Image: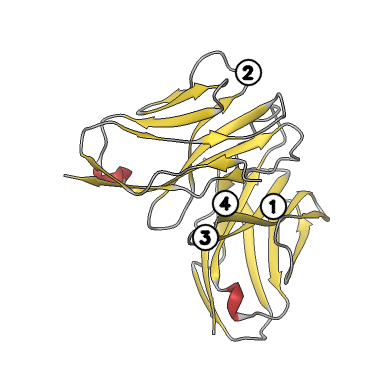
Amino acid sequence: DVKVTQSSRYLVKRTGEKVFLECVQDMDHENMFWYRQDPGLGLRLIYFSYDVKMKEKGDIPEGYSVSREKKERFSLILESASTNQTSMYLCASSSTGELAKNIQYFGAGTRLSVL
Amino acid sequence: AQKITQTQPGMFVQEKEAVTLDCTYDTSDPSYGLFWYKQPSSGEMIFLIYQGSYDQQNATEGRYSLNFQKARKSANLVISASQLGDSAMYFCAMREFYGNNRLAFGKGNQVVVIP
């Protein structure tokens, strides 16, 4: 089975703190993604990566950065957390295989509260 | 412009009955994939079923089937013989061939199964 593991289920941070959200996948997937999910807004893509050290901005990259030093690990970084970054964060991974199929598999999510 | 539209309000369905969740999509890409995910209250996004734009037959996975009407650009999910564990949010998503592995998600449908 595909396993995507997010390091924390719940996280509480203070405004201005630097926050790291970690995601690890065990299926040798090339692609990894970070989303945030807010009520009424659905899932919005923050950043994604299609290879080690490669990254592309998604729809809402402001206030976030990412790091992919190893194929299995994709980190989301909040340089200076703000209250409007309180949200559910979901990591996903997919392979680059059969065109237009590439199912994304998700982790359990991290509920981040910034106080 | 919104690529995936899910407009049904929250639904209550009797256990053992079938339920249909509507999804319409918008794309000019001739090659694309459509996905349905389930998100229970625990938060994890669980992949359910996939339909490719060139697939001749409607996709089925156990109790899940996809009613794919390409000309109408709709991809409705049918859950047969509902179970209490089917209570969740359901998300429709699309990946376009030229979309760089990105998924566009709808805002979701809430389903509550009652005994």
Cα separation, mark 4 vs mark 1, equals 9 Å
Tag 2: amino acid: Tyr
In the image shown, does A22 or A13 lie closer to the viewer? A13
Chain name for mark 3: A
The residue that appears at 62% across and 56% down in the rendered structure is: A44
The residue that appears at 61% across and 37% down in the rendered structure is: B94
The residue to which callout 1 is attached is: A72
Chain name for mark 4: A
In this view, A7 is above or below B63: below
Q: Quadrant of residue A31?
A: top right
Q: Nearer the viewer, mark 1 or mark 3?
A: 3
**Residues marked 2 and 1 touching at CB (< 8 Å):** no
Chain name for mark 1: A
Chain name for mark 2: B
Q: Earlier in the sequence, mark 4 or mark 1?
A: 4
User: Circle 1 sits in a helix, a strand or a loop, which is it?
Assistant: loop
Tag 3: amino acid: Gly
**Residues marked 3 and 2 touching at CB (< 8 Å):** no
**Residue A66 appears at what percent x and percent y?**
75, 64
Cα separation, mark 3 vs mark 2, equals 33 Å
Numbered label attached to residue A3: none
The residue to which callout 2 is attached is: B54
The residue to which callout 4 is attached is: A4
Quarter of the image containing the C terminus of chain A? bottom right
The residue to which callout 3 is attached is: A109
Q: What scheme was used to colour the molecule?
A: secondary structure
